[in-house]
Amino acid sequence: MSENKGKLAIYWAASCGGCEISILALNEKILDVTAAFDIVFCPCIMDTKARDIEKIPDKGIDVCLFNGSIRTSEQEYMARLLRQKSKVLVAFGSCAHEGCIPGLANVSNRDEIFETCYLDGPSTDNPAGTLPQPEVQVNGCHLTLPVFYDTVRTLGQTVEVDYYLPGCPPEAARIWDALVAILEGKLPPAGSVIGAETTVCDECKRTREEKRIKEFKRTWQIIPDAEKCLLEQGLLCCGLATRAGCGALCPQVNSPCIGCYGPNAGVEDFGCRMMTALASVIDSTDPDEIERIIEEGIPDPVGTFYRFSLAHSLLRRSALVPDIQRHELPLPGAGAERSS
Amino acid sequence: MEREIYEPKIIGFFCNWCSYRAADSAGTARIKHSPNVRVIRLMCSGRVDPTFVLKALSLGADGVLIAGCHPGECHYIEQNYKTIRRHAMLKRTLHALGIDERRVRLVWASAGEAAHLAKAVDQMVEDIRTLGPLRWSANWAEDGAHLDDVEKILREHAEAMEVSK
């Protein structure tokens, strides 16, 4: 390995592998990346082990692109290790940035997930009801598995992150911009998102008039007009809350934005932004009609407003013990006057 | 020993033109009501971004009370209709996340309706007392064992045999 080249690490935690494919989509520019960096760690393409990374001195890696959210103890361990060894840690892609699809598991918990995956699945054959255990003895050998957490966390909720690169996955052109910015040292303040500070609507070429919606429609219900704003046609398009950077790819092909680039600059909670925006376009002042429009039009509010950002949202997850179940438990404080 | 009575923490977002004045005149008229609502004055109930509500809940509030002018009487003409829509969406989202809808309540109170507002406050405090504390941040605090689990991986790596290259 050449001494004057930078060292690049690419890791995946709870993710799908799409981020690595997006790096490949740099096409011939990948040669420029390998000219500037030695890739020292990337389990997706190379046979390197965590223990090799442990031997690298602290801050010995120049840039680490970390994709995936944190759902097991092993992923948390790798996040801490790579933080310690990297000068610049980039939360790469929506999972590391805001939890993404793996983060939607936060509407559930470990026990429910294990039950569905290992006991209740229609194609599951598990008569002994075996569930993954963090430690087990087999023929005198002590075997271990990473511990599975109840709550998926983002990389930023686990370790300090220098930069966030949003998107599911980040567009190749944006990855290139970020790498060039890192190499040239032209970076925004640490902790910020490398990306546009405007919304998908700004990149969308559809014509926008006044938004007045009496009824939300699902994508299978209509064939949308190719020129007109999708939200104005009743489709729940998240473009107005979502950070630009993709070039409005989905609206271009008649499909509403689902918000994969995360909240726009200055927005703390993506779902709240969507609720605020939609409240302005629902065309009714009658409480019952409003309830009906919302109930029929938004059957899955968490999946709609927090498809990519549940783990990163203000509430982060659903209640481990929902209010409705707590009613069945003895009420704290109730009857307190009588107890002695 | 007497058990301590649970006192709910409720954050109130009151509109400057109606509800805040109603609360004010409830005080002047010495109407008794529960002291559990910490009131934040906003210019309009339409200013209540759902972010405020979720932030309050995530930081330890047991409930949020939004109070504004009656529909049709908004100082800014139609902003409280947006509040109705926002509140409806918020309720639905919170329900899906396991939060009872009584924890985030919307009431209308004009400047003259001090007694009505005081009653709404009492009712909300009573409901939340029944529901119990929300303690939202306990939802994502793993039991603390996770750092031991991370530590364990490091120990395993240290003890494992070196694989020949």
Image (spheres, coloured by chain):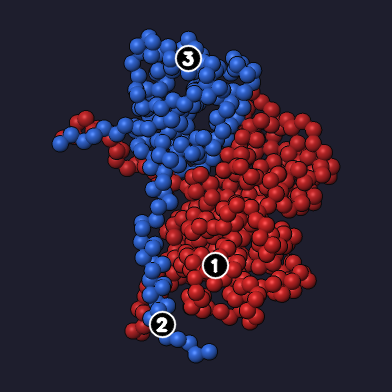
What secondary structure is found at the residue carrying circle 1? Answer: strand
Instruction: Indicate the position of residue A13 as horizontal and vertical percent values.
Output: 54, 65
- The Cα–Cα distance between marks 3 and 1, rounded to whole angstroms, is 56 Å
Instruction: Indicate the position of residue A176 as horizontal and vertical percent values.
Output: 72, 62
Residues A42 and B124: in front is: A42
| Amino acid on which disc 1 is placed | Ser
Residue sitting at 58 percent across and 80 percent down? A47
Residue sitting at 38 percent across and 75 percent down? B155
Q: Is residue A71 visible?
A: yes
Q: Which residue is mark 2?
A: B160
- The Cα–Cα distance between marks 1 and 2, rounded to whole angstroms, is 24 Å
Q: Do the CB atoms of the residues marked 3 and 1 lie less than 8 Å apart?
A: no
Point out the tag, 2 or 3, that comes first from the N-terminus. 3
In the image, are marks 1 and 2 on the same chain?
no
Quadrant of image for the N terminus of chain A: bottom right
User: Neighbour class for label 2 at 10 Å: few (<14), some, many (≥20)?
Assistant: few
| Amino acid on which disc 2 is placed | Ala
User: Neighbour class for label 3 at 10 Å: few (<14), some, many (≥20)?
Assistant: many
Above or below for A143 versus A298: below
Instruction: Indicate the position of residue A57 as horizontal and vertical percent values.
Output: 50, 74
In the image, are marks 3 and 1 on the same chain?
no
Q: Which residue is mark 3?
A: B21
Give the chain ID for the red colour.
A
Per the rendering, the mark at residue A86 is: 1
Give the chain letter at badge 2. B
